[in-house]
Each structure stands twice: as C-alpha cells, then as structure tokens.
Image: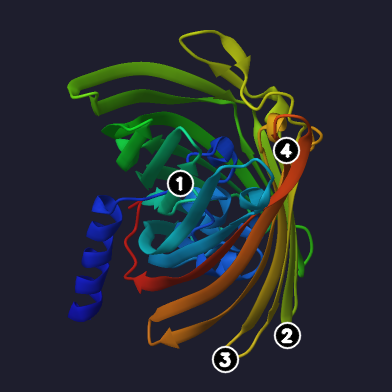
Amino acid sequence: MRKIILLIILLFCSTIYAQFDYSINPIVAFTPSVNDARARSLGRTELVTTFGANAIFTNPANLCLRDDNSVQIGGRLIGGWINDDSNNLSNHNYELSESYPIYFKASQFACVLTHHNSDSGRNISLGLGVSTYLDWAMKSKSERYYRDDDYTSDSKTTNNGGIRTLSIALAAKLNDRIAIGAGLHKSLKSRYNSKDDNHNLDIRGQQSSSDREFGYYFDTFFSTISTSIQLTETVMFAFMIKPEYCYKSNHYYYKHEFYYGMEYIYHDYRTIKANIPTTYGAGLSYETDQAILAFEYDNRPFHDCKLDTYLNRANLFDDTENGHSIRMGLEYKSKYPIRMGFFSEAIPIISDELTDNSPAYLIGFTAGTAVSFKKIIADIYAEYSFWETTETFYNGSTYERYTRKEDFINVGITLTGIIPNISLIN
C-alpha cells in the first residue's frame, strides 16, 4: 500500500511540473485531450465510456455512476512523422524535413469522492484533477535548407510548451436512471515556445546569423455541463455541452541577430483573443454481459470562431466550413478485455491551403485492454491516426498541387485505484 501511495504522489508531481508540448495549429481549441485510456482504446468515445475520476474532464455526470471513491493517473508516449511532397515541386529551391520525436508526457491526475445514500440509492460526487488540455501535444522539429545563385539559408526549429488545466466538478445521481454534472476548468500558467536555432544566411557572400524565439502564454476558462441517462437496462445516453468561451494568448517575440557585422535585438509583445462558440457532444452505449458497443458525435463549429487581435476582428479559420467528430468503440468482456475503436474528427486547416473550404479529417484506429492488480486497474491503449490535405504552390508561372500527410502514434496507460470511503455528508 505504501508503494502505491508513493507512486501516486510521484505521478501527481510529474503531471503538474512536466512540460506539455503541442503543435500551435489553432485546432487546439477543438481537440481537448481524451485522457482516459479506456475511452481512448474504444475510439475516443469518452462521454459513455469514461467513469471514475477521469469523468471530470469529459462528462462530469459520470462521476456519480460509481459508488467507489477513486484516484486515476496516466501518461502516454507520443510520436509521429510528416510526409510533405513540396520538396518534389519544380522551381522549389528549399528542402524541408519535419518530425515529431517520441516523447513521454503525464496526461492527468484526478480523484473523486462519492457520498452514497443507501436508502435512496442517490449519489453525490465531487472531483478534482489536473490534465493536459491538448491532444496534439507533442514536440516538433523542422530543418529547412534554401539554395539559389544569390541566397542560401539554413535553419533548425524546435517547438515545446503547452496548456494544462485545473478542473473541479460536481455530480448528482437523481435516481436509478438519471445523473447530472457540471465542471469548471481553468488553464494553469502555460506557455508554447518555438525557438529557431542556428539560422544562418549567406546573401552574395555577406553572412549573417540569428537566434529567434517566439511563444504564447495561454489563458482560458470554460465550463462543461452534462447528463447521463440509463434509457434501458442495456442502453445509456449521454450529452455534454461546453458554452462559448474566450481563448486568450499573449504573444511574445525575441530576435538576436548579427547582420553585416552589426548586432541587433528585437522585442515584441501582443495579445490575441479567440472566441470559441458553443460545442456539444452526444453518445450512446449498448452493454450486455459479453460486450459493450459505443457511439459518439461531436460538433466542430469552425466557421463561427472569431479572432480578436491588436489589428482587427476576423474569422479565426477564414472560410473553413463547420465539421464534426464521429467515434465508435467495441469491447469484448473477459479477464483481459479486448477493445478496439475508430474515429474521424474534423480539423480546421486554414482554407488558403486547401482547394475548397471543407475541413480536413483526422482518421484514427485504436485498440487496448486492461489488467487488474488487487485494487489497481491498469487500462492500456494504442492508437494510430493520420490526416492528409492537398495544398498548392505557385512556381512562377503555374500553380502546382502537392500532398501533405501527418501520421501519429500514441501508446498510453491509466491507473485506477480505489480509495477508502470518505463521506462527503455526515
């Protein structure tokens, strides 16, 4: 028991102090992390398959569907690769190499305390947790080489930083069939950072070099309201709504340059706000003694997002059309359950990079299982996902099309521990 408590403390500390990394693509506003390993292995069907403490982050109503108090901690390995055909275009004088190195990150720590009324069968639950907010949270590296008769350039760029949130939720089981819940989520002081290392220029024999750094300090506060309804003995329905909220980032820029033998230092600081419209999700699950089948739908209102900068107000994603998310999962129950899933999630690629205004879709396949160790349950998942777009390049006389594809691998675990009952109400 002492070893288990020590492990929980260590993982909690790593969750709070670890750097959480991600791509700065504005899709972050619509792809909050599915941190629960069981939900992840079931195609990210988090609304109807996340129970226990992790429900704080997704469907707070599910907190009170279990009578036990619990603690959940988790982490995952993330990596990926990028295939960009722009290197094969005509009159294209630069070579670009990009990747997502394999990186471990603690993804969440959460606990829930439940008061169970044995007479009425009602539950009241209180949950608290810290989690990564972004699903695209990974380190990225890129190297760019440009060559022509008058100009050469070498640059290497690394990205790191990210967003994590502190969440609190309250849930109540009104009767044998209906539960409701609400959660409040506040970003902790978080930073995205990009550093351009070894940026060297040679213009007709005149050499210069620079170190550049820019980044974003994020600040956001949002809420979630949800309900879970047991329609029949085998069918459950869940609904979650996230009201409109503001996503603010303070941009900073620093450049240290040596140019023609002179030294220059630049600083800049600006604030940008993005207004994210109301989003919602709905899910259904069908459960028997042998299996569980889950389905979920989420909206993606890209077109209604507004960007408020120091210059003007504009649509955050230009004319990108609205999209949606579809998730499915299947579990075969046994001592070591067999889980699998599929998902298709819209991502708001900037419309100037597309041949039309339709969003691209992240396609993913998942699998997983679970292992029990006395009072500890380890849920394990593996996930492969990718997205692909067709982009355009002007070569000086005509437009050429090329394909960009990004592939991702995720492997993660969630540990669930049952803790002694502590009554919330005397």
Classify residue 414 by image quadrant: bottom left
Residue 392: assigned label: 4
Front-most of 163 and 271? 271
Residue 335: assigned label: 3
> Which element is circle 2 on?
loop
Residue 161 is left or right of residue 352, and the answer is left
> Residue 75 at what x, y percent from top left?
39, 65
Q: Alpha carbon of mark 1 to alpha carbon of mark 2: how far?
A: 56 Å
Residue 205 visible in this rendered orientation of the protein? yes
Q: Alpha carbon of mark 1 to alpha carbon of mark 4: how far?
A: 20 Å
Q: Which is more N-terminal, label 2 or label 4?
A: 2
Are discs 3 and 2 less than 8 Å apart at CB?
Answer: no
Q: Which is more N-terminal, label 4 or label 1?
A: 1
* Residue type highlighted by circle 2: Gln
Q: Residues within 10 Å of mark 4 (few under 14, many from 20)?
A: some
Q: Which is more N-terminal, label 4 or label 3?
A: 3
Q: Alpha carbon of mark 4 to alpha carbon of mark 2: how far?
A: 50 Å
Front-most of 416 and 126? 416
* Residue for badge 2: 290
> Residue 158 at what x, y percent from top left?
36, 47
**Pair 1/3: label in front:** 1
* Residue for badge 1: 145
Numbered marks: total: 4
Q: Which is more N-terminal, label 2 or label 3?
A: 2
Front-most of 30 and 114? 30
* Residue type highlighted by circle 4: Thr
> Residue 51 at what x, y percent from top left?
54, 63
